[in-house]
């Protein structure tokens, strides 16, 4: 009864329904405008070409899969063992003067043993490896990373991988006699015959330059690493493959090509690239087409605040409480109506924006980073829930303060301003992180499609679009604010009715 009455009140105010429609239209219009104006191209030598679509892993995540692989077939169960050491390499034109090619390795250069489902990019794998500065680790599926605690700073080590069906286990040893297990992982659907072998890769050397006005710029340069593998078991029968390498190479690579040589039972392998998830720098995150949400929140907040202040401004709240003498139920019903209306408008706006915007980006040859369908669903539904909770929060603040302008300013400052200020480098990074943890603006974490990964050399800060809280945790912060605002408004309403 109360819920129906509040819904009738809401839909019979033309400015409120128009305001919600305006919020939805802003999300759609700005998202499509962004998509229509976006362009992307790549260089192949001196020629501008369409960027290739990135490979994806078994979960549909965009990945980088580029390395030197010295391998042989393994049918059924088995293992590979080797001592990995003498990791060295080349970094081209590093700071401070950017005028030399120097010897050295980057922290996330990798050399080790791998089991891989073929040599195609994105094929599933598990590897145990030695890094330039992060010790011995076991990685698999491009996104999973496990450190060997006792070898966190090792510069050389004995490594072993064993296969038992779909189970791959990584081991490490200091002397080749006493072995420490790192982890056991499962590669679902692993065929009977796979490729096992040695690999080396080296990601770009990254320099982050802090800007005086806030934020940072990133410079990346080509690197290549070399490692020596000895006491390799099984031995012989190796085939070398440059996984993910195109025919085009840098001038330096033409005279120092990646690959492998073998002498006296020692294999020397040189490689460049990375085996890791793709980052925002390699393509456009799917959530970018929803940037219109920031603008759409403004009319939505105004409408929700007016729903909370209207009866106080017109001195009609007393009449409402006489007809329905249950302040708690009245307040809950108003919040539910605002939240439901905002949710419906949000779902419609997000559905149209994603479907139309992504088609526009595809037509403009823009690479949208692939993500699992569950991630896309979470972004879509989560964004609609963000709008719904924003409506409830704004209603609660309006009903609590009972004045429209202060309530609109407060909600906008708490919800819309923090993510804009943090991501646009207006605030120091530490302050931006805390604002995106403690304010309702944390809810925008629900839109983050590509999570931060510790095994990447690229910066992953709020300036780069990474939120400090997990997606649902961030949305939960806004939910908590909304609950507190409505509860406080209900408490004040009850005191006035008493």
Image: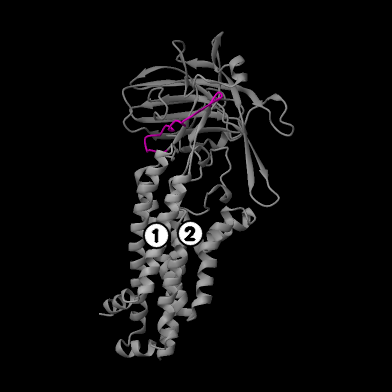
- Checking the image for residue 428, the label placed there is none
Q: Is 248 positioned to the left or the right of 62 in the image?
A: right
Give whichever of 476, 304 is nearer the camera. Answer: 304
Residue drawn at x 43%, y 46% as measured from the top left? 286
- In primary-sequence order, the first of circles 2 and 1 is 1
Label 1 sits on a secondary structure element that is helix
Query: Which secondary structure is most common in the magenta stretch?
Result: loop
Is residue 457 visible to the viewer in this orientation of the structure? yes
Across and down, in percent, residue 84 comes to 56, 22
- How many numbered circles does the render carry? 2
Q: Magenta stretch containing residue 56, yes or no?
A: yes
Residue drawn at x 57%, y 28% as measured from the top left? 202
Q: Quadrant of residue 360?
A: top left
Across and down, in percent, residue 407 comes to 50, 75
Q: Quadrant of residue 255?
A: top right
Q: Residues within 10 Å of mark 2 (few under 14, many from 20)?
A: many
- Provide the residue designation for mark 1: 25
Tell me which segment is drawn in magenta.
44-61
Give whichever of 345, 56 is nearer the camera. Answer: 345
- Provide the residue designation for mark 2: 294
Q: Are marks 2 and 1 in contact (CB under 8 Å)?
A: no
Across and down, in percent, residue 293 comes to 45, 58
- Would you place residue 143 above or below residue 291 in this image? above
Q: Quadrant of residue 3?
A: bottom left
Q: Magenta stretch containing residue 375, yes or no?
A: no
């Amino acid at each position: 009864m109360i819920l129906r009455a509040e819904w009738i009140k809401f839909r019979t105010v033309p400015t409120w329904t128009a305001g919600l429609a305006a919020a939805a239209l802003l999300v759609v219009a700005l998202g499509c405008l962004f998509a229509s104006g976006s362009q992307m191209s790549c260089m192949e030598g001196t020629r501008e070409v369409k960027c290739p679509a990135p490979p994806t892993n078994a979960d549909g995540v965009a990945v980088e899969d580029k390395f030197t692989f010295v391998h042989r077939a393994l049918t059924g169960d088995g293992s590979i063992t080797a001592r990995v050491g003498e990791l060295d390499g080349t970094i081209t034109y590093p700071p401070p003067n950017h005028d030399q090619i120097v010897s050295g390795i980057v922290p996330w250069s990798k050399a080790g043993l791998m089991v891989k489902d073929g040599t195609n990019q994105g094929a599933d794998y598990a590897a145990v490896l030695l890094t330039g500065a992060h010790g011995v680790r076991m990685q698999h599926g491009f996104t999973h990373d496990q450190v060997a605690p006792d070898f966190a700073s090792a510069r050389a080590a004995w490594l072993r991988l064993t296969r038992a069906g779909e189970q791959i286990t990584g081991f490490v040893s200091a002397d080749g006699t006493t072995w420490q297990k790192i982890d056991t992982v499962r590669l679902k659907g692993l065929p009977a015959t796979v490729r096992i072998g040695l690999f080396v890769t080296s990601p770009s050397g990254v320099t982050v330059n802090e800007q005086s006005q806030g934020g940072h710029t990133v410079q990346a340069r080509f690197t290549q690493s070399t490692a020596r593998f000895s006491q390799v078991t099984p031995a012989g029968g190796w085939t070398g493959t440059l996984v993910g390498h195109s025919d085009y190479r840098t001038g330096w690579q033409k005279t120092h090509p990646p690959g492998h040589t073998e002498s006296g039972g020692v294999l020397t392998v040189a490689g460049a690239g990375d085996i890791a998830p793709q980052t925002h720098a390699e393509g456009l995150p799917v959530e970018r087409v929803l940037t219109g949400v920031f603008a759409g929140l403004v009319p939505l907040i105004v409408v929700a605040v007016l729903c909370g202040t209207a009866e106080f401004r017109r001195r009609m709240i007393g009449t409402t409480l006489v007809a329905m003498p249950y302040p708690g139920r009245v307040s809950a019903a108003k919040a539910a109506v605002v939240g439901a209306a905002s949710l419906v408008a949000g779902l419609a706006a997000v559905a149209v924006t994603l479907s139309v915007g992504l088609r526009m980006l595809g037509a403009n040859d823009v690479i949208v980073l692939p993500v699992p369908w569950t991630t896309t669903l979470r972004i879509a539904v989560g964004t609609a829930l963000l709008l719904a909770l924003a409506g409830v929060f704004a209603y609660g603040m309006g009903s609590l303060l009972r004045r429209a302008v202060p309530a609109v300013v407060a909600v906008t400052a708490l919800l819309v301003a923090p993510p804009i200020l943090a991501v646009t480098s207006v605030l120091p990074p530490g302050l931006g992180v805390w604002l995106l943890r403690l304010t309702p603006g944390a809810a925008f974490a629900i839109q983050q499609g590509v999570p931060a990964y510790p095994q990447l050399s690229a910066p992953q800060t709020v300036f780069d679009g990474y939120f400090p809280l997990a997606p649902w945790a961030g949305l939960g912060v806004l939910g908590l604010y909304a609950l507190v605002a409505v509860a406080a408004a209900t408490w004040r309403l009850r005191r006035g009715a008493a």
